[in-house]
Image: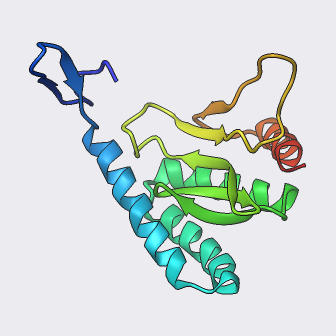
Amino acid sequence: MNDPQNATESTTAAGKTAERFSDEERAAMKERAKELKTVARRSPRAAKDDGESDVLAKIAEMSAPDRALAERIHAVIKANAPELSPKLWYGMPSYAKDGKVVCFFQSAEKFKARYATLGFNDQANLDDGAMWPTAFALTKLTAADEARIGALVKQAAS
């Protein structure tokens, strides 16, 4: 958070600079609080069914480039790991196993980044030695990219 455009700083009594959350981060936290309230009001069966409609609605709100990527990612995940349940997580489409987020799609627009991100949480079974990637930058998807994502998602959900 060293980017002065994304973080607000203030000076503490000890003269140290304290960073605050960016506007985008605060918006994501508010979205998460709203998601938790919504899920708490739903029955477990309705939460699963409504999770997919929530994700599809969020994808529909995205700008055209992000929407195209998110729609393809959603289709690849559904085809390769149907056991993962779609749900919103900090305002992003995500896919969970036993209620815990395994992977998520972050649009480029969300944090004003130059690329979208497909990320995997620690619940993902992607361990490969002592070091492995947990996020991938996306600008477009080829058939080879979709095949690689499909294999990653299968492994992550196993």
Depicted 151 relative to depicted 131: above or below: below
Q: Which residue is depicted at the point 81% across and 46% down? A: 153
Q: Which image quarter holds the N terminus?
A: top left
Total tally of numbered discs in the picture:
0
Q: Residue 146: horizontal and vertical position, in percent?
A: 78, 43
Front position in the image: 157 or 142: 157
* Horizontal arrangement in the rendering, residue 24 relative to residue 147 (left or right): left
In the figure, is residue 45 to the left or right of 94? right
Instruction: Identify the residue at the far top of this view.
Output: 15
Q: Position of residue 129 (x, y in %)?
A: 87, 18
Would residue 39 be found to the left or right of residue 121 on screen? left
Location of residue 33 with respect to 144 vertically, above or below: below
Q: Residue at x 41, y 46 (%)?
A: 110
Q: In the image, residue 142 lies at what x, y percent? A: 74, 39
Q: Which residue lies furthest to the front in this view?
A: 14
In this rendering, the answer to whether 148 lies above or below 96 is: above
Residue 104 image offset from top left, x and y in percent = 62, 49
Viewer-proximal residue, 155 or 142? 155
Question: How does the figure colour the protein chain or chains?
Answer: rainbow
Q: Which of 79 and 12 is in front in this view?
A: 12
Q: Residue at left 34%, top 43%? A: 25
| Quarter residue 77 falls in | bottom right
Q: Residue at x 32, y 52 (%)?
A: 27
